[in-house]
């Protein structure tokens, strides 16, 4: 929650320079970046009220010179109304964008903002006074856009910037809770090793190594450090989501390592890996006891809960306890029988900490040994039925 408030504060601070007498054109582009970051992390009502208050304070400070043309009561009433109008596109984004998939979801906020400005300009006696497009005065190349689209084109681009950056922000980080440049990786892991030694814990990190300039610059992986501070296992994600991930991320070698510890045999995979039962069979065949599966998908959409429920089947198939930390999505822990031991909604939780006690001894199941034998028998049965039908046909 604290991090979300930081985004709100940054957005409010920039709004002082993004609308009104003290306008800095660049500030207007970043206001929505941070405000969207905040609104997508909190409930719609609380987010809307908080954004309104931040805008009200910022807009009041940014337009103090207007008080000489209207009474103070009217001034604050107008500022309050304008600030309320600014909230509407955020509510539209919060409620609609999660229901859309991929890049198209970035369009919700800018089209909602343009719609708000258009209607406001038609019914508001002050016309287009509050349009965000006017913040870009002085940027002559950009200003030429109004000869084609009117001021709506500039408003769209300014708002779309914040939406696209947030989309990319989520897509890049995903389950990779820590992004580390290649040259900084060693120093970061040393710090993690010191923490593991100090706390005497096994520390599993979902991280990504960035190699700028490489054809596929992102290496998504987990790193397991033991209480002695030794790196005992590293796993690189093997199943990449078609599209952005497949085009920008390095793929692992296809092996899921296991590590023997006093807390059972540990293994780890990452998010989309769990959608492939034949791949996760390695975990059961290795007689693993606990499977860690860092993940990332928005919990406030159908995707988050659905993906969690899909993952539970992998735990049952392979007889493992599963601990599923999620930077976004549904953090949870389940036992080898699929019983939920702990679960958390990261979008509403006050403290993003999940504590659970899980069995550290797995159960041996048949599925990892025979795989999809039953399904293939069904295929054989279908082919046999087709052949039999052809043979019997007159």
Image: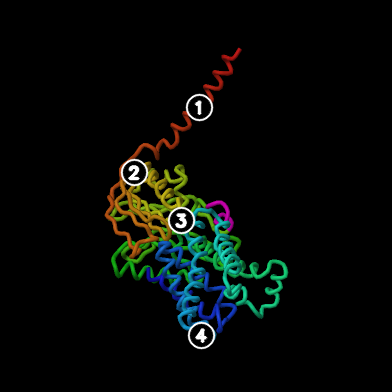
Q: Nearer the viewer, mark 2 or mark 4?
A: 4
Residue at image position (48%, 69%) is: 84
**Which stretch is magenta?**
241-247
Residue 269, horizontal then vertical, whole percent: 43, 53
As for residue 242 lying within the magenta part, the answer is yes
The reply to whether callout 1 and callout 3 are in contact (CB within 8 Å) is no
Residue annotated with mark 4: 67
Residue count near mark 1 (Cα–Cα under 10 Å), binned few <14, some 14–19, many ≥20: few
* Disc ID at residue 319: 2
Residue annotated with mark 1: 380
Q: Nearer the viewer, mark 1 or mark 3?
A: 3
Question: Which secondary structure lies at badge 3?
Answer: loop
The reply to whether callout 1 and callout 2 are in contact (CB within 8 Å) is no
The reply to whether callout 4 and callout 3 are in contact (CB within 8 Å) is no
Residue annotated with mark 3: 297
Q: Nearer the viewer, mark 3 or mark 2?
A: 3
The reply to whether callout 2 and callout 4 are in contact (CB within 8 Å) is no
């Amino acid at each position: 929650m604290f991090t979300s408030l930081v985004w709100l504060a940054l957005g409010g601070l920039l709004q002082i320079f993004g609308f009104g007498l003290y306008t800095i054109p660049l500030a207007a582009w970043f206001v929505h970046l941070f405000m969207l970051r905040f609104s997508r992390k909190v409930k719609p009502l609380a987010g809307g009220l908080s954004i309104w208050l931040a805008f009200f304070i910022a807009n009041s400070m940014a337009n103090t010179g207007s008080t000489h043309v209207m009474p103070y009561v009217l001034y604050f009433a107008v500022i309050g109304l304008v600030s309320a109008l600014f909230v509407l596109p955020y509510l539209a984004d919060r409620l609609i964008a999660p229901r859309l998939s991929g890049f198209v979801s970035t369009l919700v906020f800018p089209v909602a903002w343009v719609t708000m400005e258009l209607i406001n300009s038609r019914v508001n006696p002050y016309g287009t006074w509050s349009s965000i497009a006017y913040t870009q005065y002085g940027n002559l190349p950009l200003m030429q856009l109004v000869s084609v689209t009117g001021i709506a084109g500039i408003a769209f681009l300014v708002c779309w910037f914040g939406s696209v950056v947030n989309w990319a922000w989520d897509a890049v980080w995903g389950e990779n809770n820590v992004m580390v440049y290649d040259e900084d990786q060693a120093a970061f892991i040393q710090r993690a090793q010191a923490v593991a030694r100090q706390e005497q814990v096994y520390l599993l990190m979902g991280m990504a190594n960035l190699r700028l300039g490489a054809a596929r610059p992102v290496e998504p992986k987990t790193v397991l450090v033991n209480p002695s501070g030794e790196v005992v296992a590293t796993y690189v994600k093997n199943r990449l989501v078609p599209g952005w991930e497949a085009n920008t991320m390095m793929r692992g070698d296809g092996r899921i390592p296991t590590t023997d510890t006093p807390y059972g045999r540990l293994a780890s995979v990452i998010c989309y890996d769990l959608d492939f039962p034949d791949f996760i069979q390695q975990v059961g065949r290795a007689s693993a006891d606990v499977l860690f599966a860092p993940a990332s998908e928005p919990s406030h959409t159908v995707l988050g809960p659905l993906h969690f429920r899909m993952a539970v089947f992998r735990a049952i198939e392979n007889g493992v306890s599963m601990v599923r930390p999620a930077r976004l999505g549904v953090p949870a822990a389940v036992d080898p029988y699929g019983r939920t031991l702990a679960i958390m909604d990261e979008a509403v939780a006050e403290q993003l900490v999940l504590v659970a006690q899980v069995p550290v001894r797995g159960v041996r199941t048949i599925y990892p040994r025979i795989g999809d034998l039953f399904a293939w028998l069904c295929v054989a049965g279908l082919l046999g039925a087709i052949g039999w039908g052809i043979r019997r046909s007159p």
